[in-house]
Amino acid sequence: MHFPQEFLDKMRVLLGDQFPQFRYSLEEESERGLRVNSLRISVQDFLNLSPWPLEPIPWSRLGFYYREDDRPGRHPYHDAGLYYIQEPSAMAAAEVLAPKPGERILDLAAAPGGKSTHIAALMDGKGLLVANEIHPGRAQILAQNVERLGIKNIVVLNETPERIAAYFGPIFDRVLVDAPCSGEGMFRKNPLACSEWSLAHVASCAVRQSLILDQVPYLLRPGGYLVYSTCTFSPEENEEVIASFLARYSDFVLEEITPQWGFSPGSLQGTVRLWPHKLRGEGHFIALLRRQEDAPVQAVKAKRSAGRKSEAPELGEYPEFASQALKKQFEGEFRRFGDNLYLVPAEAPDLQGLKVVRAGLHLGTFKKRRFEPAHALSHTLKAGDVHYTANFPGDSEELERYLRGETLSVEGPDGWYLVAVDGYGLGWGKLVKGVLKNHLPKGLRQP
């Protein structure tokens, strides 16, 4: 692969006598990783099911290396959300953030969703997770990954950081800024990032990163934690951005990240770098900051809507569907958005005035005199959670047919069936006189 000479010159100065090792690593194959979705399946249960040999990633108990030829993205377990395919080094940021169940967490630049879904797993489904993406198309991809992994306590937004800061105020216990960057750490994995690189692009990224960080004081409570991460090597986008932020906001201090598992100290004390010639992963930078307990709360620049949370919605045909199809009953706050019914996180505000892509768990849609369950609901369920299941092993022909959108022949009483792979919900089908009509969304059907 051809790398820009100005990039190589920068790395030679930055790394000194380590540069030859680094340069050699750029020609090696990138590592491949998956992260078990503990919201759906335990690590041990997944290892018992896995058709591939897996090797633990040391900095995440949920992460595993897999071989190039295994192709886990093509397996029905992936469709069922049992894991997320994620570059190994990218798993470090959520581990450093260390979210706790019951907290309020914000992922400010979240697409495509790797770090948000990791945070959700560490929260164990408890608390409020707000995941934001400013680009509409990428926000939809984020929402699709959230749906596939069966995350219930999340609100997905398509907003600017400024509007989020003005709406919420400093309520969050932890904020992740996985900042848009020049992508130098991904060059061997993403040739497009390499072809688009320039010194001017690095400089423009640094400006944008600082503008995003400037909203954090309006969002993070005193005593809360900020993780700033990038997948680039440039000090201009890493240590210099953090040093400048600390100079502007004296109520933030750097917390020490222990350099272990092959992590290296950054040039700013307390930060870490992940180098591809020192560990099995791509290039990353991570800084952990804490806002001091006695920090003055920043004034919110605009007030959120004064509207109260909506009153209990008319549930229509949902209770009838739930009694006939579900053994597992959902508790929480139900909210109706048009014809769609959601179960929203208990900590979520009214959300009026925000561009909301997903407001918690989509339960389903009200049709004419009936309720149709959402695909997202199926990804929170196992075979034992429903009255009727069409359960197939991962290598079954029936499952292949279902994923292509075909109908199946199934014996049993008429009604809604959870289509499952080895007991884990994959989608819905409706049985009428022995024919299971396929309700897998058309956009998810395989050719």
Image: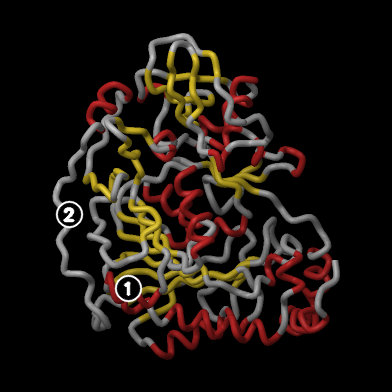
Residue 179 is situated, as x and y percent measured from the top left of the image, at 53, 72
**Does 420 sit above or below residue 200?**
above
**Placement of 118 over or under 196, stated as above or below:** above
Q: Amino acid at mark 2?
A: Ser
From the viewer's perspective, tell me whether residue 355 is left or right of residue 207.
left
Quadrant assignment for the C terminus: top right
From the viewer's perspective, is the residue at label 2 or at label 1 nearer? 2
Q: Nearer the viewer, residue 8 or 55?
A: 8
Residue pictured at 54% horizontal, 41% vertical:
83
**Residue at 22% across / 76% down in the picture?**
303
- Judge the density around disc 1: few (<14), some (14-19), many (≥20) Cα neighbours within 10 Å: many
Residue 145 horizontal/vertical position (percent): 50, 49
Q: Nearer the viewer, residue 270 or 223?
A: 223
Helix, strand or loop status at disc 1? loop
| Image position of 261 with respect to 395: above or below | below
Amino acid type at circle 1 is Leu
The residue drawn where x is 51% and y is 38% is 441
Picture coordinates of residue 295, whole percent (x, y): 26, 81
Q: Please state the horizontal and vertical placement of residue 120, each as a whole percent of the image.
A: 41, 51
Against 336, residue 90 (above or below) is below
Q: Which disc is residue 219 wearing? A: 1
Q: Secondary structure at mark 2?
A: loop
Residue on which the image places disc 2: 310
The colour style of the image is secondary structure
Query: In the image, is 277 to the left or to the right of 253?
Result: right
Identity of the residue furthest to the front in this view = 368
